[in-house]
Amino acid sequence: MPEYNPAHFYPVRLGEVFNDRFQTVAKLGFGSSSTIWLARDLQDRQYVALKIYIHNSAQHRELPFYQHLDKFLPSLHPGAKNVRKLISSFEVTGPHGKHVALALQVSQMSIRDMDTVFMDGAGFPEEFVKGAVKELLEALDFLHTVVQSVHTDVHPGNLLLGANDDALFQKLEENEQSSPVPRKQLEDRTIYLSRLMKPKAGPLLLSDFGEARLGSRPHAGDIMPIMYRAPETLLYIQWGYPVDIWSVGLTAWDLLEGKTLFSARKEDGSFSDGAHFAELIAALGPPPAELLNRHRTRALEYWDEHGTWGEFVPIPTEKTLEAAETKLEDNAKFLRFIRRALAWDPNDRPTARLLLQDPWLTD
């Protein structure tokens, strides 16, 4: 993390008890805004994932999302089981300020980490990808139709492998006690390495709702990782549930191919909306004029008044979907699924429920 500042993070110690209830037993991971720990719930006698945010987080959308989600739980919707649940929340006072802490449903590693660690970044077999995409679509149908929330940050790093029981985490705790992970002792804290675990079968859990937006009304503003951004966000058009469907298409591609479909980068490696648009045109064909007309000022930065692409950013004509797909002998149904999810116009993308009925997933 290039901007890592240890003073922003709460100095967790293994064995520490939080809120008189959650005792840390191993480090599971970290990100730019939090650390995540396996903890034992001393009250309910189960394991949880304890997520402790940095003290200077400007805005906490994840806790308000979970408070909203709680209104709809328990739910009979099949996708409810594929959304990670909040067990408790509280504040922790550290040496440099207060930290929001979330006790979340415990899980194994992310699908992205599984690919990196166990598949050498080469992607997964088609049947695994189909199963993961089905569970993801169920989760999104629940979010969109019941919870009325847009996730906005769907990608393999936010898809976790859940667990069917606590045996795996009990074994991890025992391993930490018998063979502690390496650690670095600093003046005011101990830095622990994250402990890996060999994955076992479990449900897919959609996680990390820190960028979620509530309500079915149109939204605006920057969202999504750069390489995952939907056309409407690049065109500064209002957006809604269909941005998550766009992410489903790119996630399915990532899981199968082991790499992103679009780089959104110029030849010098820098990110560029123009380069991103050019890749979209190469893969999906030109955008419909009606879409460009929704924000003419923005569109005219890249297209002329007749909808013709500007020559200053070359279209990489070799980067078609057909040329980019390398794993399947018969890829017609998969590519049709991708084209449906990656429709230029968000109004042309199917809902999560309709996409669940796609022949690639049902045959």
Image: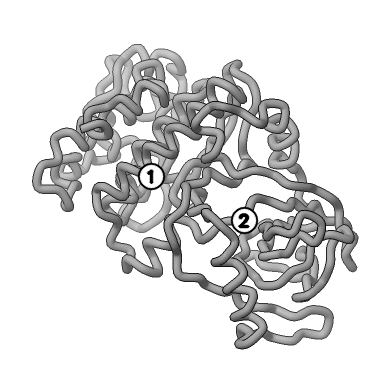
Where does residue 157 sit, x and y in percent of width and height?
A: 48, 53
Of labels 1 and 2, earlier in sequence is 2
Which of the numbered marks, if any, corresponds to residue 106? Answer: 2
Query: Residue at image x 64%, y 74%?
Result: 173
Q: Nearer the viewer, residue 270 or 43?
A: 43
Q: Residue furthest left?
A: 329
User: Is residue 163 depicted above or below 293 in this figure?
Assistant: below
Could you tell me residue 209's position as x and y percent? Answer: 62, 41
Quadrant of the frame with the N terminus: bottom right
Asked if the residue under mark 2 is in contact with the one under mark 1, i.e. CB atoms within 8 Å, the reply is no
Colour treatment of the image: one colour
Give the percent coordinates (x, y) of residue 182. 62, 86
Image quadrant for the C terminus? Answer: top left
Above or below, 25 relative to 229: below
Question: Neighbour class for label 1 at 10 Å: few (<14), some, many (≥20)?
Answer: many
Q: Residues within 10 Å of mark 2 (few under 14, many from 20)?
A: many
Q: Quadrant of residue 322?
A: top left
Is residue 304 rendered to the left or right of residue 92?
Answer: left
From the viewer's perspective, is residue 287 above or below residue 313?
A: above
User: Residue drawn 44% across and 14% down?
Assistant: 294
Count of marks, rendered view: 2
- Mark 1–mark 2 distance (CA, rounded to whole Å): 18 Å
Q: Amino acid at mark 1?
A: Ala
The residue singled out by tag 1 in the image is 132
Q: Which mark is residue 149?
A: none
The three-letter amino acid code for the residue at tag 2 is: Val
Residue drawn at x 67%, y 65% is: 38
User: Picture quarter containing residue 176?
Assistant: bottom right
Q: Is residue 161 left or right of residue 121?
A: right
